[in-house]
Image (tube, rainbow, N blue to C red):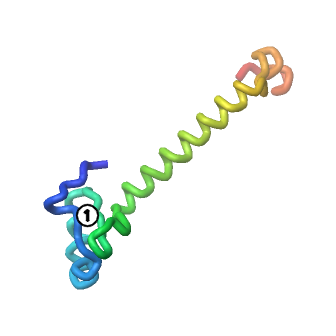
Amino acid sequence: MKPLRLSRGVVPIAKFKSEAPRWFKQIADSGEPVVITLNGKPAGVLLSPSEFDRLQERERFLASIAEGVADANSGRVMTSAELRKRLGGRRP
């Protein structure tokens, strides 16, 4: 994800509402996220669809790694021989 430029990437919700097409174009052109504020505090972040997809894929990948580590830590593992036997003698 590209870094947020505070000079360009923070907008009050009222301004965002009145200029939404401009902000969507800026995101498409720059790839930078936009923080939308409400009463001067961050209320949401607008990302490009491709950036959202990238973050979702990364989250799924990290979750699968955490699941594998948890399996290994709890002893839910098998040897190569056990795997071959389970696969019917085929080499993985």
Q: Is residue 34 left or right of residue 56?
A: left
The residue to which callout 1 is attached is: 27
| Three-letter amino acid code at the position of disc 1 | Ile
Q: Residue at x 85, y 26 (%)?
A: 86
- Quadrant of the frame with the C terminus: top right
Return the residue nearer the eye: 84 or 56: 56
| x then y, percent, for residue 75 | 77, 24
Q: Residue furthest left?
A: 7
In this rendering, is residue 47 above or below 60? below
Q: Residue at x 42, y 57 (%)?
A: 52
| SS at mark 1 in the image | helix
**What is the quadrant of residue 24 in the picture?**
bottom left
| x then y, percent, for residue 37 | 30, 70
**What is the quadrant of residue 16 in the picture?**
bottom left
| x then y, percent, for residue 84 | 80, 20
Q: Residue at x 68, y 32 (%)?
A: 70
